[in-house]
Image (tube, rainbow, N blue to C red):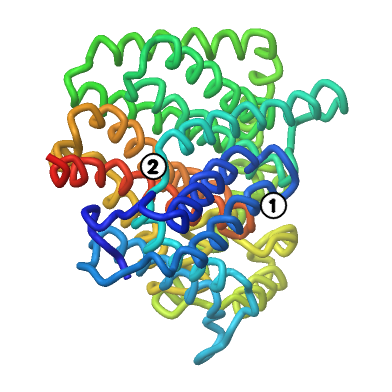
């Protein structure tokens, strides 16, 4: 059962201290190892589940927390959605997503109670950014790979590295812990951004400006226009330092994308198998199928049969059959699971964004000395659903285990971090 911040009992007993320490350490590992070792995103997630289950004995009756209920509800709903194939009444995909989602939801009560130290999240993101660059540098310079792929694939790796780098910059910008720490966080965040660039993942490059705009808007909104301007200059300098040594390579990558776009526009059937052409062909085909069944969808197996039929009729390029998704999260969900799937997917982005967004009321709900920290934490958390929404336009992120586990357990960890900061004001009032 969820509890109010006033009910936080972290540290009262050895049992509570052990659970709290374990949760904090695993939240750190979730980010620090995400891209650094094979299946790195799994270790912290499994640890959070273990310590959350171990901490069930700490729970006690209390009023429910609306934010926890909202997050838990959408996790349960999405887990069930992934499990259903929509090929018929109560048809199932056999996916193992639903237990992972439900276990993540089960972590919320304990993490909301014991909290997650914000420092574990901050330095976990920083360590994860550095680790991602370490992997990229080894693959790029030692193994002489054309582009860094990490231990997943280039797109998943590059996008997650970009998010962690920018989230680390949130703490550099908003946390207000002195210029030395801010400088370190800027450099660590730049490692994540550089790792993403070395992956040559164009989707991450497109989404990054949107996330930076959100960060700058938050600065302006809080009366920090000078810092926002300095941030623009700093980001420009950092990007120049990164891009200049490999400028020609990135320029060729962008020109390749534009060339493939033009080729597909002029001769779609001949160039549908290129990187850009394949995405456009998948989108065109998915939209055609959506218009045929916009409410109920085709089902996960039905969409394969439908695609093959259109290919046989010469209405789609045969290359579309190589992929089990539409290279677009929204279109893929809509074509397979209809209007219900589309609505739940959109809620999967908007509910966490609504829960985490730093409103003035939420900032005022913590101690004055914690307001800079909660601002950084809430902005970093808010960037996560925004990033996934943007990444999803060119990649079905939730078709991959890395995309699912990172997202759902990062949401749970950020929730615990926010509850820990909010609890300090209640504890201070009680001790006064």
**Residue at the spot of label 1:** 269
Residue 110, percent across and down? 40, 61
Residue 201, percent across and down? 63, 35
Residue 187, percent across and down? 54, 16
Query: Hey, which quadrant is residue 377 in on the image?
Result: top left
For marks 2 and 1, give the CA distance: 42 Å
Q: Is residue 105 left or right of residue 261?
A: left
> Which sits in the foreground, 268 or 227?
227
Q: Is residue 88 above or below residue 243?
A: below
Q: Secondary structure at mark 1?
A: loop
Residue lying furthest right in this view? 143
Q: Quadrant of the C terminus?
A: top left
Residue lying furthest bottom in this view? 89
Q: Is residue 143 left or right of residue 349?
A: right
* Label 1, residues with CA under 10 Å away: few <14, some 14-19, many ≥20: some
**Residue at the spot of label 2:** 381
Residue 234, percent across and down? 43, 10
Q: Is residue 399 above or below residue 372?
A: below
Q: Identify the residue at horizontal 61%, vertical 58% (top origin).
A: 46
Q: Is residue 99 above or below residue 119?
A: below
> Which sits in the foreground, 181 or 424?
424
Q: Secondary structure at mark 2?
A: helix
* Label 2, residues with CA under 10 Å away: few <14, some 14-19, many ≥20: many
State the mark number for residue 67: none
Whether residue 60 can be seen here: yes
Q: Is residue 259 above or below residue 52?
A: above
């Amino acid at each position: 059962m969820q509890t109010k911040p006033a009910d936080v009992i972290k540290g009262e007993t050895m049992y509570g201290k052990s659970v709290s320490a374990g949760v904090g350490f695993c939240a750190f590992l979730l980010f620090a190892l995400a891209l650094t070792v094979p299946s790195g995103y799994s270790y912290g997630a499994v640890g959070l589940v273990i310590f959350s289950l171990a901490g069930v004995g700490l729970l006690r009756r209390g009023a429910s927390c609306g934010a926890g209920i909202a997050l838990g509800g959408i996790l349960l709903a999405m887990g069930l959605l992934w499990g259903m194939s929509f090929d018929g009444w109560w048809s199932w995909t056999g996916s193992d997503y639903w237990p992972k989602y439900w276990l993540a939801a089960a972590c919320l009560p304990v993490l909301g109670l014991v909290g997650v130290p914000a420092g574990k999240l901050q330095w976990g993101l920083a360590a994860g950014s550095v680790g991602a660059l370490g992997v990229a540098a080894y693959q790029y310079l030692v193994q002489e790979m054309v582009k860094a792929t990490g231990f997943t694939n280039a797109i998943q790796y590059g996008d997650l590295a970009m998010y962690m780098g920018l989230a680390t910059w949130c703490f550099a910008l908003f946390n207000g812990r002195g210029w030395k720490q801010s400088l370190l966080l800027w450099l660590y965040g730049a490692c994540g951004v550089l790792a993403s660039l070395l992956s040559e993942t164009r989707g991450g490059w497109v989404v990054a400006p949107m996330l930076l705009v959100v960060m700058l808007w938050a600065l302006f909104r809080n009366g920090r226009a000078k810092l926002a301007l300095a941030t623009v200059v700093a980001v420009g300098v950092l990007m120049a330092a990164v891009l200049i040594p490999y400028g020609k390579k990135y320029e060729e990558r962008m020109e390749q994308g534009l060339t493939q776009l033009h080729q597909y526009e002029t001769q779609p059937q001949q160039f549908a198998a290129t990187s850009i052409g394949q995405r456009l062909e998948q989108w065109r085909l998915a939209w055609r199928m959506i218009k045929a069944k916009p409410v109920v969808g085709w089902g996960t197996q039905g969409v394969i049969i439908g695609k093959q039929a259109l290919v046989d009729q010469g209405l789609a390029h045969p290359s579309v059959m190589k992929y089990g998704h539409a290279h677009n999260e929204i279109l893929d969900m809509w074509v397979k699971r209809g209007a219900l799937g589309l609505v739940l997917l959109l809620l999967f982005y908007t509910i966490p964004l609504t829960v985490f967004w730093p409103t003035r009321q939420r900032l005022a709900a913590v101690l004055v000395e914690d307001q800079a920290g909660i601002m950084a934490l809430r902005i970093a958390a808010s960037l996560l659903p925004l990033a996934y929404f943007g990444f999803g336009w060119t990649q079905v992120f939730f078709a991959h285990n890395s995309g699912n586990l990172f997202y759902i357990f990062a949401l749970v960890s950020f929730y615990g971090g926010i509850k820990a900061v909010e609890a300090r004001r209640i504890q201070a009032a009680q001790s006064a």
